[in-house]
Image (cartoon, grey):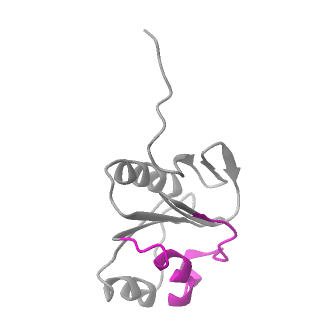
Amino acid sequence: MQLNLERPDYQYFLRGADGAGALVNDRRLTASFVVGPDALVEAWPVRDVRQMTPADLDAVLALSPELVVLGTGPTQAFPPAAVMAACLQRGIGLEAMTNAAAARTYSVLAGEGRRVVAAFVFP
């Protein structure tokens, strides 16, 4: 059986993530970042999801998502209620999960053509 690498038809694809880093296209990123199918925002200043403020969402919301997948590190954690409310007030869903789960979820949704943005937190 012959295996072929099939690349998605969007610019930035996520190959995987864990608590220490993520692989976007062919680059290993170890600092917090935001990714959408057609945008990559490196050096996102968030280091702890529990300390997030609504202003931390500016880079995420600038990409006009319908859903935000928040990778919270090696374990699942939740941002403060004010952060969740900032998304919900705009009609945008926000799902918090481990980085590995966020990478898988983002890849499936982006592959379906959904307007999804993933934000990954690394200490």
Q: Which region shows up in magenta?
A: 40-65
- Residue reaching furthest to the top: 1
Q: Residue 53 in the image: x percent, y percent?
A: 54, 88
Q: Residue 36 in the image: x percent, y percent?
A: 49, 61
Quadrant position of residue 34: bottom right
Asked if the magenta segment contains residue 37, the reply would be no
- Residue at left 33%, top 54%? 113
Asked if the magenta segment contains residue 53, the reply would be yes
Q: Is residue 1 rendered to the left or right of residue 25?
A: left
- Residue at left 48%, top 52%? 103
Q: Residue 116 in the image: x percent, y percent?
A: 39, 63
Q: Residue 47 in the image: x percent, y percent?
A: 66, 74
Q: Is residue 44 rendered to the left or right of residue 55?
A: right
Q: Is residue 63 above or below residue 12?
A: below
Image quadrant holding the N terminus, namely: top left
Image quadrant holding the C terminus, namely: bottom right
